[in-house]
Amino acid sequence: MNRKLNILAAEEHIDDGDPKVLQLPNDADPLAIEVCLEDIERIDLSFPKFTDGRAYSQAFLLRRRLGFKGDIRATGDVLIDQLVQMERTGFSSAVLKEGVDATDAQRQFDRFSAFYQGDAVKTAPHFAAGA
């Protein structure tokens, strides 16, 4: 599997108030955004707790329904176990929570190298990939 999810350590994430970065609260409906997404380069979605998965739905809606092509970044309580699902739902980068080693992330992608069903990025199911 060609991993496309960019993994960042906590200290690599810069939140400097850039107007081309949208921080979407995790209870916001992406379909109700009143900002022109063409002017946005990155959308930060928050996981306040690893058990709160609303950001997965937000990422999926941003990629599939709204066609957002920029960086969708996971922030907050991001754990290595979540990275594969994040990539499949549309995230393109993830900031690991403090103290989590980014070098351990590759083993998750090695463990789950292929999927039968389509996802937010590769919409065709595995059986149709060769067709």
Image (tube, rainbow, N blue to C red):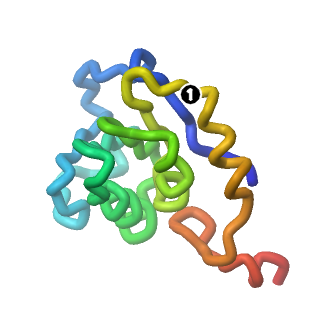
In the rendered image, the vertical position of residue 120 relative to residue 127, given as above or below: above
At horizontal 44% and vertical 68% (from top left) the residue drawn is: 64
> Quick one: quadrant of the N terminus?
bottom right
Q: Position of residue 5 (x, y in %)?
A: 57, 43
Please name the amino acid that badge 1 sits on.
Ala
From what the image shows, is residue 33 above or below residue 80?
Answer: below
- Viewer-closest of 66 and 51: 51
**Residue at the image point whose x is 68% and y is 76% from the top:** 116
Choose top left, top right, bottom left or bottom right for residue 63: bottom left
Relative to 71, is 88 on the left or the right? Answer: right
Quarter of the picture containing the C terminus is bottom right
- Packing grade of label 1 (10 A; few <14, some 14-19, many >=20) is some
- The residue lying furthest to the top in this view is 11
Residue 120 placement (x, y as % from top left)? 51, 66
SS class of the residue under badge 1?
helix
The x and y percentages for residue 48 are: 23, 42
Q: In the picture, residue 14 is in which quadrant?
A: top left
Asked if residue 123 is positioned above or below residue 8 in the image, the reply reads below
Disc tally is: 1
x, y percentage for residue 69? 48, 52
Residue displayed at 25% across by 44% down: 49
Q: Answer with left or right where residue 13 lies relative to residue 47.
A: right
Residue closest to the far right? 130
The residue to which callout 1 is attached is 102
Relative horizontal placement of residue 4, taking residue 131 as reference (left or right)? left
